[in-house]
Amino acid sequence: MTIDRAQCEALDRDDPLRHCRGRFTLPDGVLYLDGNSLGALPRGVAERVGATVAEEWGRGLIRSWNSAGWYASPQRAGAKTARLIGAAAHEVTVTDAISINLFKLLVAARRMRPDRKVIVAEAGNFPSDLYVVDSVARLVGCSVRRVRAGEVAAAVDGDTAVATLSEVNFKSAERQDMAAVTAAAHAQGALILWDLAHSSGAVDVQLNRAGADFAIGCGYKFLNGGPGAPGHLFVAERHLAAVDQPLTGWFGHAEPFAFSEEFARAEGIRRMLCSTPPMLSMAAYEAALDAYDGVTMDAVEAKARAMGDLLIALFDQRLAPLGCRLESPRDGTRRGSHVSIGHDQGYAVMQALIARGVIGDFRAPDVMRFGLTPLYLGYADVFDAVAAVEDVITSKAFEAPEFQRRHAVT
Amino acid sequence: MTIDRAQCEALDRDDPLRHCRGRFTLPDGVLYLDGNSLGALPRGVAERVGATVAEEWGRGLIRSWNSAGWYASPQRAGAKTARLIGAAAHEVTVTDAISINLFKLLVAARRMRPDRKVIVAEAGNFPSDLYVVDSVARLVGCSVRRVRAGEVAAAVDGDTAVATLSEVNFKSAERQDMAAVTAAAHAQGALILWDLAHSSGAVDVQLNRAGADFAIGCGYKFLNGGPGAPGHLFVAERHLAAVDQPLTGWFGHAEPFAFSEEFARAEGIRRMLCSTPPMLSMAAYEAALDAYDGVTMDAVEAKARAMGDLLIALFDQRLAPLGCRLESPRDGTRRGSHVSIGHDQGYAVMQALIARGVIGDFRAPDVMRFGLTPLYLGYADVFDAVAAVEDVITSKAFEAPEFQRRHAVT
């Protein structure tokens, strides 16, 4: 039976997360389906950043490292993030870029398995992860075994120091079984490092329930921390005393203000810090997490799944006949919070959509991604998005020359 | 002859940089002598950051990577910084924290001298640099030779891959002869990596005139980029094609949006980037550099030196008799832009000064630092600062219990 907009509006009326949309400022005339790349601006963030600049920096000056709590910001933000990814507060910190955190943890993992010479990595993972894996392997004298995500569990063997993969793939949104893959790695004596870039804030991540060793995540996607927001980093409690990461800056020192010339690792998760945190970006990230106040991640995941199921049902009815290909799993338990659709003219179709305010993104060679962010999107939005795709294709609007030209960032 | 305040006011009237003070917002009742730790807030920065949050992020959303020029921010900021440190625009970028940039460049330098097994490092350098040197040495199989800054030139030999030191020491403000030390390193076939944390924006750094290979610098001190602002990084043009750094994230890829699974270094300085830049902190840094518009670094250095000479003359007259020790060079050509004064009760004296709005900082075990920032301080400020130190000591105000307690960050 054909799904109509009224049905979607009814779903929105019953949505227990409906009130969260008011926690964001979104421009008029825009249907934003790219929260998986850069999350929307939560209300309150502009004010918080403004106060950090004008009051804390401008008036407090250097004193704000104490008086405004800047110094504790990574731990405070880590504790707020921990609740959203199934971790304890003291196992998570917020610092640096996600690729840098991956570098730290991979070197540290290898040092915990010095007799093992292989890093298992996910072919098809976000490329930056693969570049960092290769770089670490070169530095520490390992080889890299690249296999598809579904084959990671089987590829880990007694030579594997650490395996790393994304819980949710950046392109297809395919989701791995964190508990099962972790158990398989542990059965071989290997460590596991999960990339949560497309999980944190989107699905009900359960790091400790799965027994994960390490994880990295991204602050600027589903967590809405702002462009280039610092990443988060998880070390399971049982590893906190041993973890030995190579970016040994003064913020990871046991006593930074003793100015000792010899490094002594801080106790606990603080040892994963390197240098002075970028406080304006930190302030935005911390404030942005308030959008999750009172929201449970199982409710977020349930809505993400329902929106994805709806999008796929609409895809079957309206887009499949137009030459579109579904590039994401149909099974909602194996899918994250976006749906990818392939089309031979995917780049131009996405540009035409963006021109009319329906903003998703594009990943080479031909995949359009539609991010489904449960806090600020609803079911009627999904309906409207599919209708827009249908119209851009059937009207051939995408054939206009301005939509065929490539930008630096897409 | 005793220096009085009227003489200092006369110097201020003749100061060619006097107009720059209006480029900063400083709180009433504060005499800020800690711009060497966290620079003051330049006018226009709050507005620029506000627009980045509300307009570019809030309304532009993902489109701002193109439309607001976010993607080019590291290069744009690098070009603006280059003028201030004697480098060409294409040799400098702005990214990551200074300790992370040191890590990148040390590994890269070692790879350019694979047959050499020693890193020469400055004993007494900012400790974070020493920690990173030790970490890199461990990763790449080098040993570390630590010598005082003045002995670095002599310590470099045919086994030295790279030498690293600060142009201006964080504690004493002692300044090294960049050209002479660089030439000595090159005479032995070694590379040299300068830390400009206490140079950039404070003295007339001349990287290319000195023939330097690599440099790192700090955005949040004299350059006023805001708390935890991204650092800057210099690679001499002759090394740009060969430099091979280990934090190989997607922003350093030749074609980041091709999403190739194999790393291919970007041409030029962009290869030094790792990951998505923290745009709020980047926006603040870029805007902050406008405070240097129309200002030459030789004028900044001349004023810094004159203020330092004045402070030392006042020290001799008023503070030396009170048990204070001068911990900075008297020779202005060998001194950066702060003056350090030792006192057995240095911590408590500084706390008492801060309580009355005279804000310097403290470095263990007993050094008070007074940062002299030519853009927003004048000669009468120097007079007032010394008078305040004198009063705190002679009145024994520092003996109050609240000034004896140590804070986490000082």
Image (spheres, coloured by chain):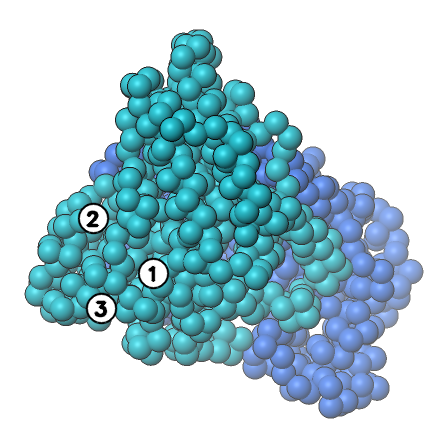
Chain colours: A blue, B cyan
Q: Local crowd at mark 2 within 10 Å, few (<14), some, or many (≥20)?
A: many
Residue assigned mark 1: B215
How far is the residue under mark 2 from the one under mark 1? 16 Å
Which quarter of the figure has residue B407?
Answer: top left
Q: Which residue lies furthest to the front in this view?
A: B1
Confirm whether residue A241 shows in the render.
no
- Could you tell me which secondary element the residue under label 1 belongs to? strand
In the picture of the structure, the residue carrying the numbered disc 3 is B111
Do marks 2 and 1 share a chain? yes
Label 3 resides on the chain identified as B
Q: What element carries label 2?
A: helix
Badge 3 element: helix
- Which callout, 2 or 3, points at the residue further toward the start of the chain? 3
Whether residue B266 can be seen here: yes
Out of B174 and B57, give the one closest to the viewer.
B174
Q: Name which residue lies at 40% across and 34% down.
A: B311
The answer to whether residue B81 is left or right of residue B363 is: right
Which residue is drawn at the image coordinates 41% and 76% (left, top)? B268
Q: Please report whichever mark, 2 or 1, sits nearer to the chain's N-terminal start.
A: 2
Which quadrant would the C terminus of chain B be assigned to in this image?
A: top left
Identify residue type, mark 2: Ala
- Residue at 44% across, 27% down: B386
Which amino acid, by three-letter code, is at mark 3? Arg
B214 sits left or right of A90 in the view? left
Chain letter for the residue marked with disc 2 in the picture? B
Residue A201, compared with residue B109, is above or below; it is above
- In the picture of the structure, the residue carrying the numbered disc 2 is B149
Look at 63% across and 79% down and name the residue there. A407
Residue B374: percent from left, percent from top: 49, 46
Q: Residues within 10 Å of mark 3 (few under 14, many from 20)?
A: some
**Three-letter amino acid code at the position of disc 1:** Ala
